[in-house]
Image (spheres, helix red, strand yellow):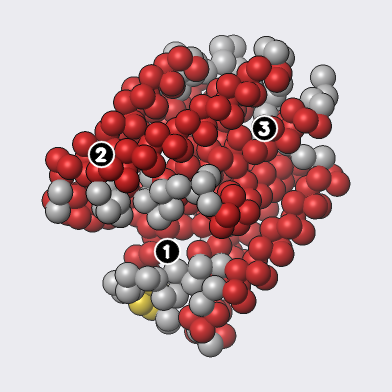
C-alpha cells in the first residue's frame, strides 16, 4: 500500500525532528532547535534532508540497509561539519590536534561517532521501530546492538547519556529543564499526530521514503544549503586547497567509494530470512523514558557541576574510539568478497 503524500510529509518531518533532537539537543549545541527561525528553516532541514537522501539511496541501490551501509552514510552526513560549519578545520573551542589544517579529534568525535550514530543511525532506528511495521535497521544490527536498540533499557541509557552530555553546554538547570520540556513535547506531539493521522495503518520504512522526484528535490535543496552555509558562515575559516581541503575531499571520496561498494555487496546478497521480527519498546514505554529524560537534564546540570567536564571528556574519548572502531569494522566487512551478513550472525547468536 502506497502512503498518501500527507503521510509521507509528516513522517519526513518527524524523522527530521528526531535526528535534530539527538544531534543538537543532546549536545547542547542548540537546546531549542524547534523554537527559533534558524532552527526551523536551517537546522531541522539540514539533518532531515541528509537522513532522507542517504537512507533513500541505501534502499534504492542496496536493496535494504546493512550496518556497514548505515555507518558509511552516517560518515557522509557528519562531513557537513567541514564546509557548512567549518568545525573540522577551526572548531569554536580550538582544535586539540591538527594534521594538515584538519582537526583530528573533532573528526573522530563529530564524524565517526556523534553524527554517524546519534544524527543518523539512532533516529532512523527510532523512527522505524516506533512509526512503522518494518524492522530493517534492527535486523541489520549484530545481536548485542539489536538487543540494545530494541529494549527500553537501551533507550533509557541513551536518554540519560544525553542528559549528562547536554549539561556541559547548558548555562543553568532552568534552561535545561525548559529545553527538555519543549523539545520532548514537540517530538511527542509529532509522534501522536502521526498515529492519529495514519489511523493505525502500518507502513514499512521503505514505503515512506521519497520517490525519484522527491529525492531529486531534496538533493537540490541539500545542495543549496551547502552553498548557503558554505559561503554564509565563517568562509574565512576554509583553508587553502592543500592540504586542508584536499584531506577532507579525499575523505569524502573514500567514504563514497566504501558506501558504493557496501551497497553493491548488499544488492548482490539474498534477502535474509528472519523468522521473528526484533522487539521494540511500546510508545508508552518511550513516553515514560521521555518523562525521565526531562527532569534528568536539570538534575545532571545541578548535581555534576564542573565535574561534568571530566565526564564529557571521557565520553568524547570513548565515543571517538567507538566511532572509529565501528568504521574500521565496516571497512573490513566490505573488504571481504562475501560482504556482510549481520542478520545471519544475529540469528545464530540467538539460537
31 w.r.t. 254: above or below: above
Q: Quadrant location of the C terminus? A: top left
Q: Residue furthest right?
A: 213
Badge 2 marks a residue whose secondary structure is helix
Left/right placement of residue 113 relative to residue 336 reads: left
Q: Residue at x 42, y 63 (%)?
A: 107
Mark seen at residue 11? 3
Q: Residue at x 59, y 29 (%)?
A: 190
Sooner in the amino-acid sequence: mark 2 or mark 1: 1
Q: Position of residue 210 (x, y in %)?
A: 77, 40
How far apart marks 3 and 1 lie (CA) works out to 30 Å
How far apart marks 2 and 1 lie (CA) works out to 29 Å
Badge 3 marks a residue whose secondary structure is helix
Q: Which residue is mark 2?
A: 298
Q: Position of residue 271 (x, y in %)?
A: 69, 26
Badge 1 marks a residue whose secondary structure is helix
Q: Are marks 2 and 3 in contact (CB under 8 Å)?
A: no
317 w.r.t. 213: above or below: below
Q: Residue at x 77, y 30 (%)?
A: 6
Q: Are marks 3 and 1 in contact (CB under 8 Å)?
A: no
Q: Is residue 8 visible?
A: yes
Q: Which residue is mark 1?
A: 107
Left/right placement of residue 282 relative to residue 295 reads: right
Mark seen at residue 196? none
Q: For the residues carrying marks 2 and 3, which lies nearer the camera in this image?
A: 2
**CA neighbours of label 3 inside 10 A, class few (<14), some (14 to 19), many (20+):** many
**CA neighbours of label 2 inside 10 A, class few (<14), some (14 to 19), many (20+):** many
Q: Is residue 164 visible?
A: no
Amino acid at each position: 500500500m502506497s502512503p498518501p503524500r500527507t503521510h509521507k510529509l509528516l513522517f519526513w518531518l518527524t524523522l527530521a525532528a528526531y535526528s535534530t533532537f539527538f544531534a543538537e539537543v543532546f549536545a547542547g549545541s542548540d537546546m531549542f532547535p524547534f523554537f527559533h527561525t534558524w532552527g526551523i528553516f536551517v537546522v531541522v532541514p539540514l539533518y532531515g534532508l541528509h537522513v532522507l537522501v542517504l537512507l533513500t539511496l541505501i534502499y534504492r541501490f542496496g536493496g535494504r540497509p546493512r550496518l556497514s551501509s548505515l555507518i558509511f552514510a552516517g560518515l557522509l552526513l557528519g562531513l557537513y561539519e567541514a564546509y557548512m560549519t567549518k568545525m573540522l578545520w577551526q572548531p569554536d573551542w580550538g582544535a586539540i590536534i591538527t594534521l594538515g589544517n584538519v582537526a583530528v579529534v573533532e573528526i573522530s568525535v563529530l564524524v565517526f561517532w556523534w553524527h554517524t550514530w546519534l544524527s543518523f543511525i539512532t533516529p532512523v532506528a527510532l523512527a522505524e521501530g516506533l512509526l512503522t511495521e518494518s524492522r530493517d535497521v534492527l535486523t541489520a544490527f549484530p545481536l548485542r546492538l539489536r538487543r540494545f536498540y530494541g529494549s527500553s533499557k537501551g533507550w533509557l541509557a541513551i536518554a540519560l547519556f544525553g542528559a549528562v552530555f547536554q549539561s556541559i553546554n547548558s548555562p543553568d538547570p532552568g534552561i535545561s529543564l525548559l529545553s527538555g520540556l519543549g523539545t520532548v513535547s514537540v517530538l511527542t506531539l509529532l509522534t501522536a499526530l502521526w498515529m492519529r493521522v495514519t489511523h493505525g495503518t502500518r507502513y514499512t520504512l521503505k514505503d515512506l521514503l521519497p520517490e525519484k522526484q522527491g529525492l531529486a528535490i531534496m538533493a537540490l535543496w541539500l545542495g543549496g544549503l551547502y552553498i548557503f552555509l558554505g559561503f554564509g558562515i565563517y568562509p574565512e575559516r576554509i583553508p587553502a586547497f592543500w592540504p586542508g581541503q584536499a584531506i577532507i575531499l579525499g575523505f569524502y571520496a573514500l567514504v563514497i567509494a566504501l558506501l558504493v561498494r557496501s551497497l553493491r555487496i548488499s544488492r548482490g546478497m539474498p534477502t535474509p530470512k528472519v523468522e521473528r521480527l526484533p522487539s521494540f519498546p511500546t510508545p508508552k514505554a518511550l513516553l515514560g523514558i521521555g518523562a525521565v529524560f526531562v527532569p534528568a537534564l536539570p538534575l545532571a546540570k545541578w548535581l555534576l557541576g564542573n565535574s561534568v567536564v571530566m565526564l564529557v571528556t571521557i565520553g568524547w574519548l570513548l565515543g571517538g574510539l567507538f566511532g572509529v572502531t565501528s568504521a574500521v569494522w565496516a571497512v573490513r566487512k566490505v573488504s571481504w568478497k562475501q560482504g556482510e551478513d549481520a542478520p545471519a550472525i544475529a540469528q545464530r547468536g540467538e539460537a
